[in-house]
Amino acid sequence: MSFPKAPIQRFNENNGSSAPQTKYFPQKTYSYQKVSRIDSPTFLNDTQRSSSSIAITNNIKRCGRSESVDTRMNSIALPNKNLDKMKSTSRSKIPSPCKKPQNHPMIRKPTSSFIDMSSQSQNVSIQNRNIPKPAANTNDKQNKKVYEMQYFTKKKRLSVLKKELLSKQKSLLDLFSSMSDLREKVLETTGKDLGPLEEFKLVDLGSLITGSNEVHSQKTSEGEGAGEDLTFTTLRTIGEIDNGFLTHLEKKLQEIPEINKQLFQTLIVQTISSNEWMKKLKDENKITIEGEGNQQQFDNHLNEGENLVKKLDEKKNLEEQAVKELIQDIKKKLRHYGSLEKADDDKHKLNQERLEIIQSENNDLVKKVKFLTEELENERDKSNTLKDRKSTVDIQLKGVRQKLRDMEQKLSTDEIRIVQLLSQMKVLEGQLKTKEATFDHKAKELQKVNKTTGEQMAKLEKQRNIHEARINELKKELSCKETEALAVIEDLQNKLKDAQQKSEEADKLRITAESELETTKARMLEIEEKGKQLTEMAEKTTSIIVTGDESKRSEREVDLWTELNSTRELLESAEKQIKQLNQEKNEFMEIVKQAAQEDDGNIRNICTMYHTKVIEKDAQIKELQNQVAELSASVSSSQEQNSSLETKLKDLQDIFIAQKEDNTSVGNQLEISELQTKVADLQVTMSQMLKEKEQLENTLIQKQLEVEQRDRIMRGQSNVLRVRDELIALLKEREQRQDEEISSLQTSLELRETSAQKVTEEMMEKFGAMQELCSTLENKQILINRLEKHVQKLEEQNDKGEARRIRYEARITQLEQALQETNQRGNKFLLI
């Protein structure tokens, strides 16, 4: 591919700067001098412009003639931005390139005052290539257009200069006011007089309007930024100044100080009257002044009136002298101005004759300059058209290059993306294969685990049901035993109540016996005699107690034997249950061992839990066996005690009956002693029974706690079974999730395959579009080569045009030099 040549860097020759300008065609800014009217000083700076405007106003006042202001305003040339840095190369004025001044409507005969003003200003060659002046032989339409263009450009420049002048005048007024304030402050603080400020006059050039040789004046214009009324001096046509005007001016000057004089006189009269009044008061001793200093001040205050009168007279004399001197100076200046006016008129006539000669010479030169400027403009138009064409071609080339770059970037990005997608596809396929293999292996393992766990769960459920049935049976047996124990306790309590009643009766009998003992003390001797008989009777009673009735004793033994047989049967049944539980435990341990060999870690943990629980149950069973043995021993002992107590009570009842039948006195004492011993024995047995009762209550509480612990154990076992069910459900959910993930992976693979197909299709389409773009780019490259050749031809033509333009510029500079020489000659004649 071939691209156009690099842009040529050229320098701006007009400004003289070395900053490079990137342009495809060498562009130079050429300036040619343009001839103005004879009464226009060229390109003044701000100070020169202000001095020229002040000179215009002074000349108008001095001459006392109503001249058109437009001719004066045209004396201030409009500077161009590119020509402000140019130095002045010639003096005096340059004649107008337009028609003769007699026929031009904007040009009138210059006065001597205006010629004097033009000799003071610096003259610079005017350069303005944008608005050419019309030639004498051109058509009327072209002349009208040129005049209109000149008028509007000068009007714009006039408004700009007016704004600048107003802003400068505003700043000048602000400075003047600040200086006056500072002067007053210096006088107040230090007392130094810095001297009077210089007076100046402000001119509003925008208020000068000329029409049909008449001058209108505008008096005031308001400043927008400061908000103050800026009064400007209005230019007026002044007639001839005579002696009447001077007398009038003298009267006005004398009237000004009289106003101040009257004010001072009134103030002096008031001070004198106040001083006289103060003197009267002092003479009448209505005012007393103490101290010498105060007395002196009072006297000085009284003498101030006389001093003021003297000062006023002195000031009046000074003012009269100043007015006289001022009028004399005005008369001298008026005489001087009259002589100058005569000299100006003579110079004006001579200059007018010389100007007519110079203008006739300049017309020929202006025609030649006009012809050359027209040719230059034609060449510039051609170069501008060529530049426009080249700029459009450059823009098109830039657009095409940008499109090519964008397409190349897109191609590179698409290729990188395709490579990335292919690599990702390969990686994903490998990952899918590995995941499928892992999922298959896991699925097989899970199936095996599910089979084994299902079998084991069925076995465990069967065992659970068996254990639950056995536990229910044991609960029933425990409830039966508890009811039996409660019944035994109730019987014992009833028997205790009966024994208490009998003991109460025995107490009553003892009381009666004590009363009888008191009666029988007298009979002690008789009792001693009959001692032997009583001893015999005692032996008989003891033999009766030992032997008892055989019929009653056989019935009691049968009852005890039956109770012992029942307890033995209960113990045998408990031992049988313990043997069965041990057998079930052994079977359960064998099942657990088998499950531990086959199942994974979770099932092993469950088996260990069950094993620990079985061991705990064995310990609990042993404790229950010990408790049952203790209860059986306590029941047997309580039964034996109850039987012995019953026999004793029956024997006592028989003895009492026999004693009542005998009614012997000696036997009563022995019986009483025996009864006392028996009562003591009964009290001991009662205390023992109460202790046993408390022990039985404690054992009942322990049994209840054990039952609650068993219930808790059963609940824990049920929780374990529930956890097992939940684990099975979780395993099933995992299998379902794995199946869903496998299905989602399959769908994602299908989607990626479809996306890869779409990407390949898009790539094929993009390759086709790229081929089309390459073909279009080749065609455009051919067009670019053609355009480059055409541009080279245009550059050659442009170089030829530049060579012509340089020739014409050299010719124009020669003509301008000739014009400057002629102008210098004319100025020399004018100065002479």
Image (cartoon, helix red, strand yellow):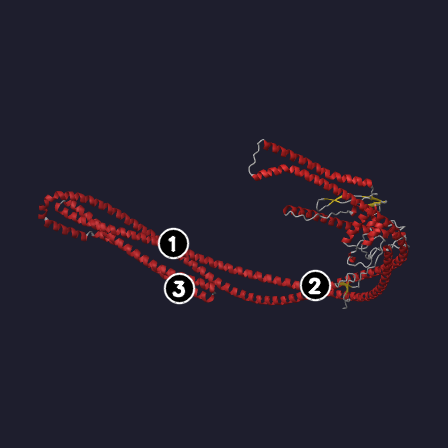
Q: In the rendered image of this protein, does residue 283 appear above or below residue 85?
A: above
Q: Residues within 10 Å of mark 1 (few under 14, many from 20)?
A: few
Which type of secondary structure does the marked residue at label 1 adopt? helix
- Residue 295 % position (x, y): 58, 38
Q: Does residue 111 show up?
A: no
Please give the residue where the numbered disc 2 appears in the rendered image. Answer: 762
In the rendered image, the quadrant that contains the N terminus is bottom right
Label 3 amino acid?
A: Asn
Q: CA distance from mark 2 to mark 1?
A: 78 Å
**Sequence-earlier tag: 3 or 1:** 3
Q: Is disc 2 placed on a helix, strand or loop?
A: helix
Q: Earlier in the sequence, mark 2 or mark 1?
A: 1
Mark 2 is surrounded, within 10 Å at the Cα level, by few (under 14), some (14 to 19) or many (20 or more) other residues, namely few
Kindly report the distance in space between the C-alpha atoms of the residues bearing marks 3 and 1: 26 Å
Badge 1 is on which residue? Answer: 708
Residue 165 at what x, y percent from top left? 76, 50
Position of 782 relative to 498 (above/below)? below
Expressed as whole percent of the image width and height from the top left, the position of residue 256 reads 74, 39
x then y, percent, for residue 241: 82, 43
Quick check: marks 3 and 1 in contact, CB under 8 Å? no
Mark earlier in primary sequence (2, 3): 3
User: In the image, is 129 to the left or to the right of 738?
Assistant: right
Residue 586 marker: 3
| Marks 2,3: beta carbons within 8 A | no
Q: Nearer the viewer, mark 3 or mark 1?
A: 1
Find the distance from the CA under tag 2 to the CA under tag 3.
75 Å
In depth, the one of 99 and 688 nearer the eye is: 99
Determine whether label 2 and label 1 are within 8 Å by CB: no
**Residue at (81%, 45%) from the top-left corner?**
334
Residue 648 seen by the camera:
yes
Tell which tag, 2 or 3, sits nearer the viewer.
Answer: 2
Residue 113, placed above or below residue 591: above
